[in-house]
Amino acid sequence: MRIAKVYNVYVVLTNQVLDVPMGYIEVKRPAGGNVLAHAVTHRLFLRKSKEDIKVMEVLDSPRLPFKASAMFRITDKGIEDV
């Protein structure tokens, strides 16, 4: 966060996701637990959808609604809205 403030840049942190079995369902949870969750402003969940489409969901944000989502694909031209 200090680098972002000093240099006026965005900093992106990534984390691995684990499948945690809970009875008959599996829940996806961040591998780092709450450590990264408290260190960032916006938490987003990226997942693959059908074919080459990706989905990004909001998990926590002071300005975006919970579970808001956007679909996109990555092509030779860059990131394209679906």
Image (cartoon, grey):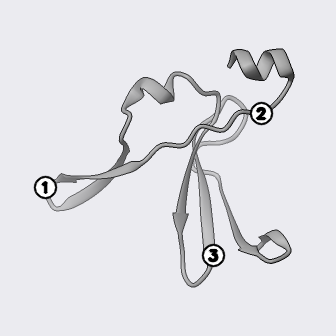
Residue 63 percent across, percent down from the top left: 73, 33
The numbered disc on residue 10 is 2
Q: Residues within 10 Å of mark 1 (few under 14, many from 20)?
A: few
The numbered disc on residue 53 is 3
Which of the two labelled residues, at mark 1 and mark 3, occupies the earlier sequence position? 1
Which of the two labelled residues, at mark 2 and mark 3, occupies the earlier sequence position? 2
Residue 45 percent across, percent down from the top left: 54, 51
Seen at 40% across and 27% down, the residue is 34
Q: Residues within 10 Å of mark 2 (few under 14, many from 20)?
A: few
User: 29 above or below 78?
Assistant: above
Residue carrying label 1: 23
Seen at 71% across and 15% down, the residue is 2
Q: Nearer the viewer, residue 65 or 29?
A: 29
Counting the numbered discs, the total is 3
Amino acid type of the residue that numbered disc 1 sits on in the rendered structure: Gly
Asked which quadrant contains residue 26, the reply is bottom left
Mark 3: secondary structure: strand
The answer to whether the residues at label 2 and label 1 have Cβ atoms under 8 Å apart is no
Question: What is the distance, in whole Å, between disc 2 and disc 1 at their CAs?
Answer: 39 Å
